[in-house]
Amino acid sequence: MQLEILNIAVEFGNKPILENLSLALAPGEIGCLLGASGCGKTTALRAIAGFEPLKQGQIVVGAEQISRPGWTLAPQLRRVGMVFQDYALFPHLSAADNIGFGLRGANRQHKRQRVADMLDLVGLSAVAHHYPHQLSGGQQQRVAVARALAPDPAVLLMDEPFSNLDVALRERLSLEVRAILKEAGTTALIVTHDQNEAFAIADRIGLMNRGKIEQWDSAYNLYHRPASRMVAQFIGQSVLVPGEVQDNQQIRIALGCLTSRTPLPANSCVDVLLRPDDIIHDDNSPLLATVLAKSFRGASILYTLGMPDGTRLLSLVPSHHNHAIGEAIGIRLDAEHVIAFPSDS
Amino acid sequence: MRSAVSLRQCAKHLLLMVSAITLLASPAWADEEVVVYSARNEQLIKPLFDSYEKATGVRILFLTDKEGPLLARLKAEGTNTPADLLLTVDAGNLWQAAQEGLLQPVDSAVLQNKIPAHLRDPDNLWFGLSVRARTIVYNPQRVKPEELSTYAALAEPQWNKRLCLRTSNKVYNQSLVAMLIAENGEARTEEIVRGWVNNLATPPFADDNSALLAVAAGQCDVTLVNTYYLGRLLKEDPNLPLKIFWPNQQVDNSGTHVNISGGGVTRHARHPEAARKLLEWLASDEAQAAFAGVNLEYPVNPKVDVAPIVAAWGEFRQSPLNVAFAGAHQADAVRLMDRAGYR
Amino acid sequence: MSIPGQAATSHPQSQDARWPKVAIVALAALTMLPLAVIFASFADPQAEIWAHLGEFVLPRLLLNTFWLLLGVGVGTALLGISLAWLTAVCDFPGRRWLTWALLLPLAIPGYVLGFVMIGLLDFTGPLQTSLRELLGAAPPIPIRSRGGVIAVMALTLYPYVYLVARNAFATQGRRALEAAQTLGLNRWQGFFRVALPMARPWIAGGLAMVLMETLADFGTVAVFNYDTFTTAIYRAWFGMFNLSAASQLASLLVVLVFLALLLEQASRRGQRFTPGSRADRGERIVLGTRARWLAALWCGLVFFTAVAVPLGQLLIWAWQSRADLDSRYLGFLGHSLVLATSGAVVVLTLGLTLAYALRHRQGTFISLSGRFSTLGYAIPGAVLAVGFYLPVSWIDRQWIALGDSLGNRWEPLLGGTLVAMLLAYAVRFLTVGFQPLDAALHRITHNMDEAARSMGSSSRDILARIHLPLLRGGLATAAVLVFVDIMKEMPITLMTRPFGWDTLALRVFEMTSEGEWQRAALPAITLVLTGLIPVLLLMRASDSDEIRHAT
């Protein structure tokens, strides 16, 4: 493992910010901490960078332990690069000088070559001598990435790297940055609140909630196999529908019978996670639901539907099936293995 | 925005205040008044002005400043100057004011009778009002008075590392050297000043007080100061090991160097008569004691008694050279001191 | 992210294009008037004096001046920057009160500290005297020396650097430093390669003020009998009765300062220095135990030497001369306060006008004129006073002549009025008011103006509702600096005051010019204590600013 975080805890004063947080990244892997603001993801990043001391646990980069309670290797000694949310470019230095800033000890020839390579990598050779205020937002962002990559860090950290960019640029750049990181073979950990960004850039994603990682997994598994109610609700769109467990992991809900992916105690009450693509619009179906709201998405329409018993459902329907609000339409269930969580009550 | 509003109001109030004060401060000219530009400090003249006002009912308006700016101001104001009387603390600047045509002659028998000829301008443009003697002060624990004789003798090698001096930037030293030039010529004077510089125990001090204290503390043995500085120090601590020696008292010597604090009526004075009266009063026996006494100086009027602490220093013979020479040779003196390396 | 504080240069505003030029030219003319008088002295050539000066005086004085400038520059930079960094970014015991206490030397005139230090440390002072009594001999402390005068001037002038550097460090935030750390620099390296260069324009502005004040200073160097260029000016004037030669020397000084200012400006062309957008000012660097106490010790030591010692000595002397205290002191105090307050208002108004005019208009002519109008600070006070008084008297003479021709006896229009006095202060202190305002104004982007304009605000509206609140910090700083400077000012006050308008500073002058330092302590301490009030207010204001920004 290139980056290993074991059971770390961080406190501000006596207020716990991170608790029992663990994750690991293999060399060249890109990880992402995803979560709403205030969940502690930036603090985790700052702990790895060495700006926050640990209360518990340890952080290991390569084979070297860099943080443990009572001891924090100085940030400048840990070969951990960081891209800040506001980039923190040095306004008094040109793009090239910003990128070359961390290349110390290298001889001049080597340094110049490295800066040129990095400028090339991020495609900014043409504006090498511009000052930060003369660059566009996207260019500044790439200078920040190049600057952090130039000293060849063992791990690269990025704090909401795209949040200052407009949406179109954000998607393009996140793919671009992923390509850059993969080309450089960099192990990276990114923090974001935007799941699309996380899906686009990361190999592994940790969903954070209240200072803990709820689930550390691939994007596919986070979506299809959420480990908790919280994960299920945070990732993608879904509804929870009450049901009752019968034998053989069969769950009965208002719409019919489903199979649980995980074993559940018989005769218990559960909430079944239904994604919009689990509900199919079928004019021939005897099951009817009323359209409560609709949201046009181009190729498809996302319908919010109401069942006679009050259950709400989401259904993604090809957009040529255009129904008015209040209309009753036929639906059927198209899910074989579903995720269910024991009811709260 | 509250802050903006209050700022604006603040500015308005201030403007009102300033304009009101400006109006109030515009001087209103009364007939019975004299306007004085004084380089002599407020605390040294105000008591006298107060008693003059009380005695005569004449109002005295005065401004203090350094001599240089006062002369520049008089010159700039030209015919419109409000000043009637110019007071300085040295003869050089009075001479300079006369040179610049800023003073008018005063024909006054009183002034001529009371003030010895060498302490006033031959053309009656200005008059000395008090005498400031620049003399030798020594530490009796380290120097016998027999060793001392003249200003020039302090340049002898026996005083090597034993002399303290005030800076040559001070007009008192410039006047002293100017008078030495008048007596001895430039070449000889330069030798003397070089000798002083060679004998310095420590770099020149910023003021006479420091030089006196250095002598008392044994940092050096002799210094050249105006007597009233010693008077002030002794008033505070009579036990200081400091004694006065009057230099140049031998028959073939010229006498101790003196300068004056004095004044003259300005050329464009609006109240020349009142100014003359004030000058005459300042030279009168009653005012002389106070004018000199407030700063432990010597009265110009030799008949007037000095303060007891001053009387204790004994009588001395003043240099009979007209103090106007101090002005005439002052620029030369400064250049000479530059050449001699006296800082 | 788009970097804020963007080009003040990019949006010349066309709709009111006239007034900035007029304002700048008018302000430049106001300063140029005395400067012109000073330069006009060349019409009266003084070849002989120059030959003398060149041979015997200038070589030494230029060297002296050079060392003094270098020493005071380095000294104020070291003190100002280190103290600013510690109080703005780090945390240590006593930081809160030291933050404002370290500004107090602003209120203490250099010649006072100089006199106190010489009095305490020289051969005759209590330290060496008691050492001699104890040990028989004492190692001499060369206080009356180049090192001594440099130390004293650095200790009184460092607040100019401290104030601006502290502001720059505080707004920079820790982000830049952390970025440097993740790039392999330790805190020291990060400080020197990132924090310091980023704060450079502000520090340079503060240093420019320090150096100009050093060049123009006469009082402090006189106490040390350390001859500088200014000494030569006064020596030519007072000693040789040659105001022309003095003015010629002074004009050389002005040219030197002007070139230095242009050079500094040119050296950072193209770079832009903008504070970070995020308010991460609440966080402070947590120092180790030893470092904490060292930081506290350093700041405490500076406070002790620059404030506690002179204040203590002044208090003792003031007590000894307490008999001098009479009802007239109320008058002196009142005059000082009125002059300093109204002077500050005038200077701030003009400074703000200049800053705005420069914001609206570019071009070589404009920026040169702008530079000219702030040169008054580098001219020795008495020389400037004469340069100012000459044209004032000329105007008065014309005025009175006009009155005479109409058969009326008119009083002088300007001479002996507060108006002339305040204008003279404006010429002298415009740069002191201008610098902080200009720095603050640079942080207001044109986007903000345009946003407000798009919501229908008028120019006046924008000024009142957006700029003034945002400029509050800069205004407060400028006001305090000007206020305190006027409180301490002597030559202009002496030359231009109306009859009876004696101030505290003039009381100090009257006493010290006859060597009565003990008696000068009473007005001096009153002056210092009065000067403290606005300094304290400034610190309170900037404290609450900090809190506001941090949340």
Image (tube, coloured by chain):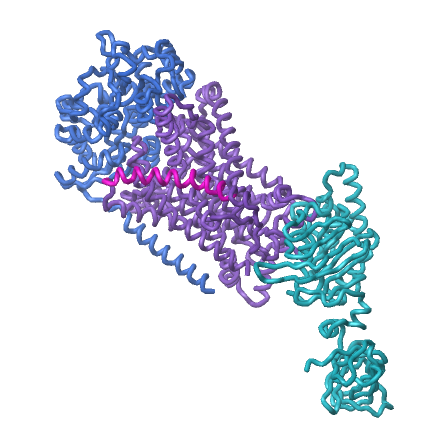
Chain colours: A cyan, B blue, C purple
- Residue sitting nearer the eye, A9 or C543: A9
Task: Give the side of residue C129 with respect to residue C255, left or right.
Answer: left
Question: Which residue is located at x 25 percent, y 21 percent?
Answer: B133
The magenta stretch spans residue C399: no
C106 above or below B161?
Answer: below
Q: Position of residue A316 (x, y in %)?
A: 80, 80
Toward which corner of the image does residue A8 lie, by quadrant? bottom right
Q: Position of residue A301 (x, y in %)?
A: 79, 80
Q: Residue furthest top?
A: B252
Toward which corner of the image does residue A332 lie, by quadrant? bottom right
- Residue sitting nearer the eye, B269 or A157: A157
Magenta residues, as a range? C295-323
Q: Position of residue C141 (x, y in %)?
A: 43, 26
Question: Which residue is located at x 38 percent, y 46 percent?
Answer: C531
Q: How many numbered badges does the structure rendering display?
A: 0
The magenta stretch spans residue C309: yes
Task: Give the side of residue C384 with respect to residue B75, left or right.
Answer: right
